[in-house]
């Protein structure tokens, strides 16, 4: 049941319907940038091609670079609009302001430490004048990576013991306590205050589900936004 609700491969799953609803505002921003600049370059930190395919994004005026630690396969017919690079998001191999917009969906919480999260944010701000960065809220009861209520509030030493005993969805079973501790710390969720501290010049948009903060999105744009 949970797999069908939270499947990223099923375009009609519950989680992808939420993503598509969130993406409607992102799409509007991208179209405004295109109207202003013509063809634009986007850097997706931690992204893969499957996300953009699921969002049904098709626009000849964008070129999207997907940067991830893992390889991302791009269909041959899409290589005019997408390219992929295996690299560390904390040390992106691009000069300052190389892109028109940096985009990132649910990546900053996986940087491994607060120091790395801050470095990630600095890279975002270095690489483009505009950015859209999303992260899940620590205050939503169901932890999105392991799908266990309130797992995000369990101290890492206890989580490491649990991971030594069995896998927990996103988190694989650890061979020993030290490995379990490292695995647990690969996901450090946050509240709005800390997230805003990383992006003080951005507007922080809160997505709610059932009246509870589900995610936060930091949006910084060079152009003014007009209300509908």
Image (tube, grey):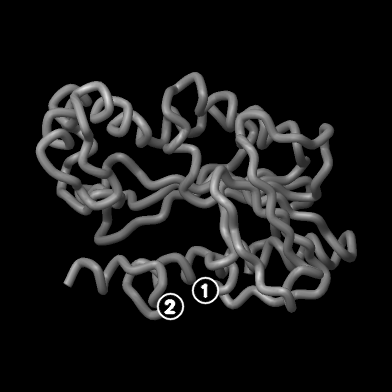
| Image x and y of residue 46, in percent | 56, 47
Could you say which is closer to the camera, residue 199 or residue 170?
170
For marks 2 and 1, the one nearer the N-term is 2
**Residue 220 position by quadrant:** top right
Q: Quadrant of the C terminus?
A: bottom right
Contact check, label 2 and label 1, Cβ < 8 Å? yes
- Marks counted in the figure total 2
Please give the label number shown on residue 54: 1
| Disc 1 packing (10 Å; few <14; some 14–19; many ≥20) | some
Q: Residues within 10 Å of mark 2 (few under 14, many from 20)?
A: some
Residue that lies at the very extreme toward the front in this rendered image:
175
112 vs 196, nearest the viewer:
112
**Quadrant of res 81:** bottom right
Tag shown at residue 11: 2
Relative side of 10 to 1, left or right? right
Q: Is residue 190 visible?
A: no
| Vertical relation: 113 (above or below) 6 | above
């Amino acid at each position: 049941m949970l797999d069908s609700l939270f499947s990223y491969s099923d375009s009609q799953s519950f989680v992808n319907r939420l993503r598509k609803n969130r993406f409607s505002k992102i799409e509007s921003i991208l179209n405004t940038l295109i109207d202003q600049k013509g063809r634009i370059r986007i850097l997706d930190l931690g992204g893969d091609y499957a996300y953009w395919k699921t969002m049904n994004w098709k626009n000849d005026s964008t070129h999207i670079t997907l940067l991830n630690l893992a390889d991302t396969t791009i269909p041959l017919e899409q290589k005019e609009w997408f390219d992929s690079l295996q690299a560390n998001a904390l040390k992106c191999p691009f000069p300052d302001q190389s892109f028109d917009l940096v985009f990132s969906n649910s990546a900053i919480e996986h940087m491994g430490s607060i120091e790395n999260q801050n470095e990630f944010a600095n890279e975002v701000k270095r690489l483009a004048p505009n950015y859209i960065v999303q992260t899940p809220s620590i205050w939503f009861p169901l932890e999105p990576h392991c799908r266990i209520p309130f797992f995000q509030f369990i101290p890492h030493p206890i989580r490491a013991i649990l991971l030594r005993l069995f896998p927990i969805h996103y988190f694989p079973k650890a061979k020993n306590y030290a490995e379990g501790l490292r695995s647990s710390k690969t996901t450090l969720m946050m509240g709005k205050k800390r997230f805003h501290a990383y992006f003080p010049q951005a507007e922080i948009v809160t997505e709610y589900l059932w009246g509870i903060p589900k995610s936060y999105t930091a949006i910084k744009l060079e152009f003014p936004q007009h209300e509908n």
